[in-house]
Image (cartoon, rainbow, N blue to C red):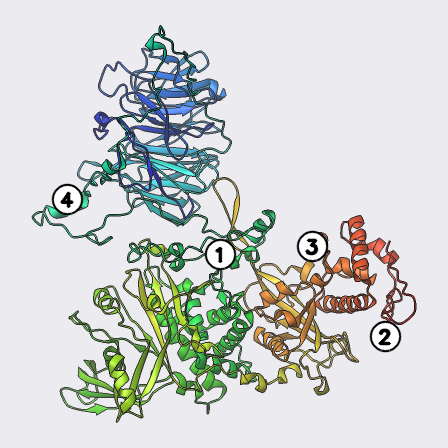
Amino acid sequence: MESDWQEVCVLNCLHAPSRKSNLRMPAVPPSQVVGYTTVPPTLAFDTNQELLWVGSEHGRVISYFSPELRKYTSYRGHDHPLLPGDDAVRNIQVNDRGVISLAARSLHFSIRRGLAQWNIAHEGFRNLSGFAYTNRGTSEILVGGGQSSMFTVNVDRGTVIGEYSTEDDIKVMKRNPRAIVYGTGKGDVKLLDMNTFKVVREFPQAHGSTISDLDTQGNTILTCGYSPSRQGTYHLDTLVKVYDLRTNRALAPVGFPSGAAFVRMHPKLSAAAIVASQAGQVQVVDIENPAAIKLYHANVTSYITAMELAPSGDALALMDADGYLQLWGSPDKLRFTELMNPVEWPEPPVLPNVTIKDDTPLNTIGMPYYRDVLLSAWPPHEVFSVNKMPQKIDADILAASATKTGYAPYHRRTPRYCIERTKHTDPTGAVPKFLSQQAKSKGSRNSGDFDDGRLLYGDEARRQFEVPPVFRKVEIKYSKFGVDDFDFEQVTLYNGQSMIFRLETHISNSYMNPLLQMYKFTPLLRNLALHHTATACTKDDCILCQMGFLFDMLDKANGQNCQATNFLKTFSSLPTADRHGVLEEDSSSGELLSSMIQSLNRFLLDQISLDQRTWRNDSRALEEAITIGATKSQRCNICGKESRPLGDTNVTDIIYPAKYNKPVQTFSALIKQSIQMDTVQKGWCDKCQRYQQQAMRKLVRRLPKIMIFNATTNEKSLTCVRAHWSTPGWLPDEIGVVVTNGQLSVFQGEDLRIMKERSQDLVIFDLVGFVAEIKPEEKRNTHLISFVNVAFSSTDRTQESNWHIFNDFLVTPVGKEDALDFAPKWKMPSIICFQARDPCNTIDNSWRNYLDTSLLYIGYSFGYDFSEPERVRLCKSLEQYEEPKPGTLVALDAEFVSMQNEETEVKADGSRSVVRPSRLGLARVSVLRGEGASEGVAFLDDYIITREPVVDFLTEFSGIHAGDLDPSTSKHALVPLKVAYKRLWLLLNLGCVFVGHGLLKDFRIINIHVPKEQVVDTVDLFVLRSSQRKLSLRFLAWVVLREGIQLDTHDSIEDSYTALRLYKKYLEYSDAGVLESMLNNIEIEGVKTGFKPPPRGLLAEHRTDTPPIVWEGRSEANTPQPRGVGSEVAWSLNVM
């Protein structure tokens, strides 16, 4: 069962079934709905056609076609019972010829259209309960039950051919490839040889009493059953027993606290099982890892009586005691069987062409033949819509009302004057396509998925209770090409401007994306982070530096998707983060997401403040920006002793009234109380030497330029908190603050307008944005989004208000009224950010003028001697006269190792889906001079220290061996990831132009964004015009430079130097005007060789030495002269 499984159809025998219908009608005639107190019904999916078979307790067999459950056939297979319940259908199985149904005293076989083939009522049939096919395939079955004999029946002839004695009361019988398995009334599980039908193996006392259900697949048997209780009654066991036929022993059971009544093994996933209780709880469990479970709950008013899983694994059928048939599955992938045969439908009747004469008998005409309006065609003004039948009152409500004189608590799912919508309203086509799929469909894009405002913001009548699509949780879909194949553009709703970035969600701890997006659009916080990053700070775990790297990457992204890989990796490595419980893997499952993001907010602000003080203890810029300077006054109510410790805070928790009173307090009043903390609580008194009631109050000394509040909430005070936030206009977009002798005054609305005219000390704070928790009814999809006024981060500030929704990589503009509307129950703020209104608090990019570039000129490594000859020959540090400038050409290549393998999920149809792509880590990066006297000489060749385990060194493709990244064993110059990254970041911001092959992927893994104008990628330079085929670096080196590279393994210096030479050749061919002819010859040669260089021996035989690069002439002998040098231009490309 996949995560999107849901109730797809509820069968209504008397009317057409409706999807997601809350109106339930019996699946069998109403006279038969008696609770199935004798024999429950049976279900069976057809293995050859798209049919579901249902057997009733009155001997009738009914089939339904397709997931719509369209009725196909219905026939009476068993009748004339000697005792009540003898005609009930107890088991159904199908083969390629028809359907076999079993009752207590008879066996019936019909074709799928309902025509009977044979019916057996043998005198030995007294209390049959199950049957299974033998080793003769579908031509023979073995039947048994609560009687002393088992019988074999020839299906082809419809005759009993053998009888075998048994002492067991058989309850359930299934066929395994090795044997026939059955469960008994005493709780035993036994295996029969399919030739002699004797017991060859048994598992005694699997359950204390009768077996309830059993299933087997491969070498595994699963059972569930009853056990006696101390009161003498029987109850369903809370354990599903697991047996291995290879070792003939029991394995660890699977727990099911609700009591397992039904069990089915997945037909394609050998370790997956589906367990259900009578109450409707369905659990998908991995028997090899019982902790990995998925829970579902079927909406039943009585109890489940039958369950069956389709052969495809894509559909699950449930029947309850009231006769309601439920079909569960994924609406988009629901099918019963893999290889289905067409269903045979009756031919439509052909109406005869009758010529009517005076003597034509009227009975030959038939009905209906008419052209006039019939009396049954009512005029529109006399046709009225009527409501459906009232819903059945829930049993829980009836039970609750019995103790309250007819009154029951309201469920609060909908307003009292509304009923639940029964129509499925999920927007179709909302799942974006992959880029590879769009290429197959000739570039067509499903761009209209979000064009309709109703799809974005939902139905206005339902918006208060139903989360609109734009606010719902978004997930990245993976194809075989990984996350790069996902079409982020399709789900981006921005109106075309290029300043808005998007953050991806497939990384651990990416729940903090909304908070980082809000920080990014707080101009002062963004400026301070970038100014710190421009310094020479090399602290490996500096969060402030990583924040600056991230903000700069987002600025350069120009609307493209980004990922906070390096930031989150550094954040996860902090030991203090683990202690504060802000890591996803360490958080408890019951912890509210809003509480977690608020703890993270406090932690990050404290951490960046610590990072700033660690780098420069005399710097107070960050402290002045985010810290409320205050002194806490504590006075003991008993002895009167007063103390005044410091009470500086970076984040203020909003304190709400203990009780909800009307009218609610204004936002400004709550902010004042929360900052000053005028409260009475217990604290330690040094004079009394005990805990006493103390009056506490804060005296504010200094206001920050950024005020950030945690809108603290918990389940107990949620009603009071929601009453405040749901008040229209309760959150203002600006507030005014005045500090007088330590006393704080906060104003909003009309009071603020008056104070602007009266006070000169008034500080106005604008609302920058807030992080909100979106909590739909299905709480597993709870997530966080941010609402930000991006106008404050605009360089021109032409707009005062420009609100946007940041739902990870889904970004769309929103009106201020909609952004500040907290009336919907699913929307609750978690963090609010205000910034002081000041001309200086705008975007500042002057940090680019103060870049500390000393890292580019020094050797920074662990335990490596830079004076060694081999190091000097391969890598020579930059000299001061070689200072990079805008346009400086450098060649770059990087090598990576695998840090995490790809995680895939095998679906029910056998196809594979990527759950989490493989994760690569930077292992080596080399940067070469691209021009000058030392052209082609590396000035950076860094191996990256890796402290986390490496899954695969990918030596064949990276040249990295085990031990190369370990400081204790490596022979190379090792540097921390931050140092290597900062060197590249400095080159980027100095304006260097990077030359390389396949740089887009390298930059993505390095987690840096380089503008297109600073990238020269030889993949794009030598792309074939006819097929848009991209050529490998090795093939280009052979066909253009006549050299062989990557003969044994990859080397980043060799690869980057080859890319640099290819770029020089590209310039020469373009200058000579022969580029197109050159590309044509490359394509011709590539077709001959399969776009691969010749084998190594043949390559060495034809390899020629390339002369050194001489810029006064040409670099190779076969390079043409530029146009205008001579009267004639001749050129040739000598290829094999």
Q: Is residue 1111 left or right of residue 621?
A: right
User: Residue 843 location in percent, x, y?
Assistant: 48, 81
**Which residue is denoted by mark 4 in the rendering?**
398
Q: Distance between the residues labelled 2 and 1?
A: 50 Å
Tag 2–tag 4 contact (CB < 8 Å)? no
Q: How far apart are marks 4 and 3 (CA)?
A: 69 Å
Q: Is residue 270 left or right of residue 943?
A: left
Q: How far apart are marks 1 and 4 (CA)?
A: 44 Å
Which residue is painted at 40% across and 87% down in the image? 624
Q: What residue type is labelled 4?
A: Leu
Badge 1: few (under 14), some or many (20 or more) residues near its Cα, within 10 Å?
some
Between discs 2 and 3, the one toward the N terminus: 3
Q: Can see residue 755? A: yes
Near-viewer residue (392 or 1072)? 1072
Regarding mark 3 in the picture, which secondary structure is present there?
Answer: loop
**Which residue is denoted by mark 2 in the rendering?**
1110
Front tag of 4 and 3: 3
**Which residue in the rendered view is the most extreme toward the top?**
359
Query: Which numbered marker is on residue 476?
Result: 1
Q: How far apart are marks 2 and 3 (CA)?
A: 33 Å
Q: What residue type is labelled 1?
A: Ile
User: Residue 269 location in percent, x, y?
Assistant: 47, 41
Regarding mark 2 in the picture, which secondary structure is present there?
Answer: loop
Between discs 3 and 1, the one toward the N terminus: 1
Badge 2: few (under 14), some or many (20 or more) residues near its Cα, within 10 Å?
few
**Which residue is denoted by mark 3 in the rendering?**
1028
Q: How far apart are marks 2 and 4 (CA)?
A: 94 Å
Near-viewer residue (189 or 509)? 509
